[in-house]
Image (tube, grey):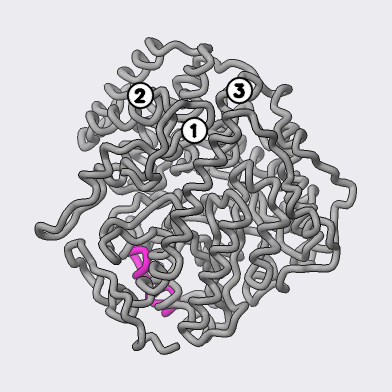
Amino acid sequence: MSTSALTHRVHVLAPPGHRHDEILTPSALDFVGHLAAAFGGRRKELLKERRRQALRFASGSPFDFPVATSPVRADPTWRVAPPAPGLTDRRVEITGPPDRRTAVEALTSGARVWMADFEDATSPTWKNIVDGQLTLLDACERRIDFTAPDGTQHRLGDHDRLATIMVRPRGWHLVEEHLEFDGEPVPASLVDFGLYFFHCARRQLEAGHGPYFYLPKLENRYEARLWNDIFVVAQDLLGIPRGTVRATALIETVTAAVEMEEILHELREHSSGLNAGRWDYLFSLIKTFGHRTDFLLPDRVQVTMTAPFMRAFTDLLVRTCHRRGAHAIGAMSAQVPGRGRAADEAALATVRLDKEREAEDGFDGSWVAHPALVTVCQDAFDGVLGDRPHQLDRTRDDVEVTAADLLSTRRVGGPPTPDGVRTNIAVAVRYFAAWLRGQGAVVLDGLVEDAATAEIARVQIWQWLRHRVLDRETVLRLLDDEIDALGAAYPWADLDAVRALFERTTLSVELPQFFTPEAYARHLVRHAGARPVYAESRATQTEPRAAGTQARASDPEAGRRHPDQRLQDAGAQLQDTGARS
């Protein structure tokens, strides 16, 4: 079908920006509108099913592998598509927001893949979203350059080999309020996917690769099926052969963990594997079972990837992927060097052990958040892979994982420490301040933090309060301390907004499923002229409730020097090195 035949016009409600007309062309908006018309209704139904599933778990429904799809798991014959060009060897993948500096540093870092992240590493201001699309367009054309503070020139065109680009669109729970279709905001996933696909899919094919994606926060096979249908329609609309798109699904929810094979099966002609999402997985575990005392988790730093339930999760992922000919990609390492020789050596040693364990367990590659970690990760995988591009032949037939194994948290359970409580409050507060200002990835205490770490920080506070191993007065006192420290270090911070966001998303009886939808609607939406601002009506609504609460059902789219050295270090690193995730 020719794109000129499309009539599904999307209206732009935001003020124009520099070069925005290159992305927001009539044909590109028609393409996005066609996707919204075809798939917007299914998306809403799937979000309703998420709420129903949460209520079922809250009422005591058992957690297990689905019986209805046991034939899919039992059938040994099916496989996903073979690795696509540029995705055969994925031993090191670097992630980060799609800004120009991060793009150049990531693409020239020596990593095999760069995941351009519109999801957890991007604060979804309209400028960030459209500028991110411009970054990707310019990256495909090799016309990005920038000058570092020391005067060094960086140009993509000076490098023979660049990392393969994969794009992570925003999740199904989010909308883009600056684009309107049929009187409603367009699903954010379709905006991020559609604009990149329309402008860059054919360019990537001409360069010898293809349009490749990471799919965030899937909760079941039906959500994977929706993505697969979107890929089919998008390819047909632009006359691109089916199977050209490839997508790696992030397994970062507990409900997806028992449907890994089904997710691969739904995506199989477009699948490029699965990824183990570390912090989002813990975040999901608490949201799903946080009402139960046997799921009380301690400080997040104590819940490592060697915890029994995390080992069950990752072993199952490797076995599932390799059984079906798919890549298994390991979890994020977010350390950032630059805190002194001893601290840097300790951080690199931690990363090295983490990546060596993943390689020995059968993973085909892993994630890092900073270019300085690329060599460490590559060395770890080189030691196992050698000259081989992957280890798909290692099927891990020794692995047997039950649903109970995925939930075996008792051996690591326990109450928090005072340091753990303070750290979680500090991370959430400082990240909220940056996110509200338009920064989705920030360096805090030597780690790149993004929305995923802010989410696990806030829901842990909520869980500890719910089970009364932490009292509200302590949280409020520590919150006061962190707000005061934030204001002293960063005069630009909107302290009232940060405090209100923390209280709404952490101290409420009903746990909002994500902090981003309501915070986006309240603070980041900037419509042009006198058009109605959806954020004003949605900001008062309640997000979908967590398991175990008695909330009503609702729409998920609702919507200088300082003694605190952590804040001072974070500010200096943001200015000197930029932020990545």
**Residue 110 shows in the view:** no
Q: Earlier in the sequence, mark 3 or mark 1?
A: 3
Q: What residue is shown with label 2?
A: 564
Identified at 60% across, 70% down, the residue is 246
Image x and y of residue 297, in percent: 60, 24
Tell me which amino acid carries mark 2: Asp
Check disc 3 and report its element: helix, strand or loop: loop
Magenta stretch in the rendered image: 131-147
- For the residues labelled 2 and 1, say whether their Cβ atoms are less than 8 Å apart: no
Of residue 305 and residue 551, the one placed in the foreground of this image is 551
Number of other residues with Cα within 10 Å of mark 3, as a class: few under 14, some 14 to 19, many 20 or more: some
Answer with the quarter of the image where residue 243 lies: bottom right
Number of other residues with Cα within 10 Å of mark 1, as a class: few under 14, some 14 to 19, many 20 or more: many
Number of other residues with Cα within 10 Å of mark 2, as a class: few under 14, some 14 to 19, many 20 or more: few
Identified at 79% across, 39% down, the residue is 402
CA–CA distance in space, label 3 to label 1: 12 Å
**Residue 138 forms part of the magenta stretch:** yes
Q: What residue is shown with label 3?
A: 292
63 shown above or below 485: below
CA–CA distance in space, label 3 to label 2: 36 Å
Identified at 42% across, 64% down, the residue is 190
486 shown above or below 123: above
Q: Residue furthest left?
A: 530
Q: What residue is shown with label 1?
A: 546
Of residue 430 and residue 544, the one placed in the foreground of this image is 544
Q: Earlier in the sequence, mark 3 or mark 2?
A: 3
**Residue 479 shows in the view:** yes
Answer with the quarter of the image where residue 264 lies: bottom right
